[in-house]
């Protein structure tokens, strides 16, 4: 038989649908670390997030110092 005239094969698997009486809370994502590698990686990421927050705080402070100094300089030039 010619390949162009053959019908495509039907899928042999059906989609698995959850039964309506099943509790959806039992399918919740478990975020607890399962291995030592996951514990160490999570700890390192949390430490990095803290360091980034500290750097951002310092940059924000420097930004405000520059803004206040520019405004103060402008006011002193206008006054004097």
Image (tube, grey):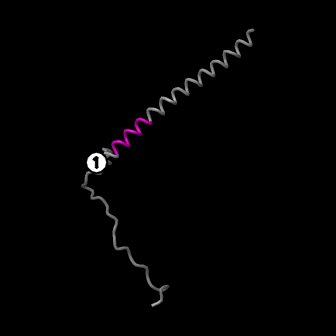
The span picked out in magenta is 38-48
In the current view of this chain or complex, which residue is farthest to the left?
Answer: 21
Residue drawn at 75 percent across, 8 percent down = 80
The residue that appears at 33% across and 42% down in the rendered structure is 39
Specify the quadrant of the image occupied by residue 68.
top right
Secondary structure mostly seen in the magenta stretch? helix
Q: Is residue 37 above or below residue 5?
A: above
Q: Position of residue 38 (x, y in %)?
A: 34, 45
Q: Nearer the viewer, residue 34 or 80?
A: 34
x and y percent of residue 52 in the render? 48, 33
Q: What percent of the width, then of the height, locates residue 27? A: 29, 51
Reply above or below: 53 against 14: above
Q: Nearer the viewer, residue 67 or 12?
A: 67
Residue drawn at x 43%, y 79% is: 8
Disc 1 target residue: 25
Q: Quadrant of the N terminus?
A: bottom left
Q: Callout 1 environment at 10 Å: few (<14), some (14 to 19), or many (20+)?
A: few
Q: Is residue 45 magenta?
A: yes
Residue 16 at x, y percent in the picture: 32, 63
């Amino acid at each position: 038989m010619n390949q162009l005239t053959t019908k495509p094969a039907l899928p042999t698997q059906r989609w698995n649908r959850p039964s309506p009486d099943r509790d959806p809370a039992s399918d919740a994502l478990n975020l607890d670390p399962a291995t030592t590698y996951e514990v160490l990686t999570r700890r390192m990421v949390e430490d990095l997030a803290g360091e980034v927050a500290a750097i951002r705080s310092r940059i924000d402070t420097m930004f405000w110092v520059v803004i206040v100094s520019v405004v103060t300089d402008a006011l002193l030039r206008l006054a004097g």
